[in-house]
Image (cartoon, helix red, strand yellow):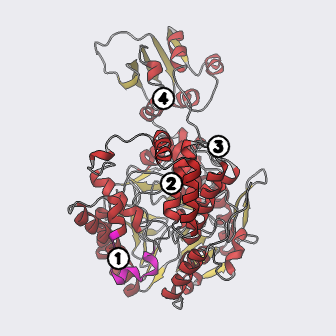
Amino acid sequence: MTAATEPSSYIVDQNQRVAAELPFADTTDQDDADRGFIAALEPGVVRDADGNVVWDNDSYDFLNGACPASVNPSLWRQAGLNIRQGLYQVTDRIYQIRGLDLSNMTIIEGDTGVIVIDPLISAETAKAGMDLYFANRGQRPVTGMIYTHSHVDHFGGAMGVMTAEDAESGRIPVIAPAGFLEHAVAENVYAGTAMTRRATYMYGAVLPRGPKGQVTAGLGQTTSTGTVTLIAPTVDITETEQELTVDGVRIVFQITPGTEAPSEMNFFFPDMRALCMAENATHTLHNLLTLRGALVRDPHAWSQYLTESINLFGYDSDVVFASHHWPTWGTERLIGYLSVQRDLYAYLQDQTLRRLNQGYVGGEIAEMIELPPAIENAWHAKGYYGSVSHNVKAIYQRYMGWFDGNPAHLWEHPPVESAKRHVEFMGGADEVLRKARVAFDNGDYRWVAQVINYVIFADPSNEAAKTLQASTFEQLGYGAENGPWRNFYLMGAYELRNGSVGTPTKANAPTMVAALTIDQVFDALSLRLDGPKAWHEKAISDWHFTDEKRLHRLELRNGVLVHYDRRSGDKLPPADVTFTLTRQALIGVLLGGQDLGATLQSGAIKIDGDAQSFAKLITLFDEPDPGFNIVTP
């Protein structure tokens, strides 16, 4: 293990310029973030049932000091705002829990109890937040729960607020935008292993906290590491201006699919003149393509929905709040805030396409775009979570894909083979390192990172290259205004110096896997099939689901799993084997790790036909790797 580097003179100078150029004397955000404070969780630590720490806001106490040279002053300011922790009053009957997870949990006081909006990531942090509210506002029953959208930091703590039985019985409505369950499960199961591994870099949850380590993720501090849960919605919101009354509270909804999440909604409390913007307007430029991986979001639709929010609800609102950061009060102020947020996404969309149609590629456009002064000077439009650079590239990708049109880039060698050839062309590893050290001393860190990456991928045992690359990543991290950029750079440096940390959190939480539909189970299974191994194998099985009264067929052919519902009277060839079972039994055996033999003995699954054909099928699947390498091959 080697020690982290000190910030270079280039980074010190850069950060000093940031401190001199930005309007740090404006303390409006600090005043808004402190407004309505009632009480903090003392100590600001949350543990699970075994005593393991799943959230530690107190570990960020160092942020109360002066900004060090190893942190961009703009990001330090954002981190200082994010660490404000506790119970806050937004307006009459609306309260928020902030600083107990990446996201906020909002609590609305109804006629007989409380409606909870977005119960954080973990059941433990959600329960701690509810207990803090009850300690200061009195014990009240939960009478409703609302998910604003389909990302885990807005539903994962559901069972810290209520039970699944509360929802199933109809006692507590669980409200979500249409498509919520499908998107929540698909995102976290289909590509969940890869996304979760990259999220380790994006949020830096395992990095040491401190001036040379993790200081914030921009959108919030980091992710909690407790128990992720999911309670399925019981009420779908399907159209804008749909209205519900929950425990005496009137709520008017606005669906916004394809914005920050594929399934998302804003909503308005007309009797309280309060507007919830979910994650569509926060105090940062958001991601159009999050660095952990996701579908590219639509900035055009995003900006249009923000216009619709302003016109539908803005002029009748006294406060706007979201599921991250702090509220904005006053009709004129909140309309100005929402308008700049709207203009930000529209400008990036329009200018990227303008340049794209002039023949520029994503990497070029990202270096060319400058924001208008009114947007550039707005603190809430700064790139603490998304960035102009990677958002512009995302827009290019959305419209043009990975290929920039240059045939030289159409069929390049993959990373390791490309790296070997680059290093040979440049005179060998020693010569590359010699030149790279000169570039490092000159502060050209972007170039050093690129060329040393070739050396590492050509020879991952080259310790000198890994040490220089770690130092380079640290310098890039120290200068980053964007929280995830800093975390990615510092996580890369950390793993180069210490080895892989793997993935500290699991991608497929049991309650999330349990929410899979039959089609999604077979879809997820097909993603694990070793295609070449299965090229010459054929198998046909029927699956009779007694709980859903469905007969589903699964065919293996040409290395592909094809599945579909059988129709009455169809003329399909007979199956090799037929299984009779429930959806949960299917999930348990295929994705939940339950032993097939024990399940058969229990009678939960019955088999008619050639059971060996299915046993052979199981041998054709492999497992995802939650600890795959990122900064080394």
Amino acid carrying label 3: it is: Ser
Q: How crowded is mark 4: few (under 14 residues within 10 Å), some or many (20 or more)?
A: few
In terms of sequence position, does the residue under pointer 4 or pointer 3 come before the other? 3
Kindly indicate whether the residue at mark 4 contacts the one at mark 2 (C-beta within 8 angstroms): no
Q: Which of marks 3 and 1 is nearer the N terminus?
A: 1
Residue marked by disc 3: 461
Find disc 4 in the rendering and name its residue. Answer: 547
**In this orientation, which residue lies closer to the viewer: 225 or 496?**
496
Residue position for label 2:
451
Q: Which amino acid does label 2 sit on?
A: Val
Q: Residue at x 33, y 54 (%)?
A: 397
What kind of element bears circle 2?
Answer: helix
Under tag 3, what secondary structure? loop
- Tell me if mark 3 has few (under 14), some (14-19) or many (20+) residues whose alpha carbon lies within 10 angstroms of its own: few
Question: Would you say 507 lies left or right of 334 here?
Answer: right
Q: Of label 1 and label 2, which has the lower sequence position?
A: 1
Decide whether residue 378 is among the magenta residues.
yes
Q: Residue 209, relative to residue 343: is it above or below?
A: above
Q: Which contiguous range is marked in magenta?
A: 368-382
Q: Using the numbered discs, state the Cα–Cα distance from disc 1 to disc 4 in whole angstroms.
A: 56 Å
The residue positioned 27% from the left and 45% from the top of the image is 407
Q: How many marks?
A: 4
Rounded to the nearest angstrom, the CA distance separating label 2 from label 4 is 58 Å
| Type of the residue with mark 1 | Leu
Foreground mark, 3 or 1, reads: 3
Q: Which of 287 and 35 is in front in this view?
A: 287
Quarter of the image with the N terminus in it: bottom right
Q: How far apart are marks 1 and 2 (CA)?
A: 31 Å
x then y, percent, for residue 131: 69, 65
Q: What element carries label 4?
A: loop
Element type where label 1 sits in the image: loop
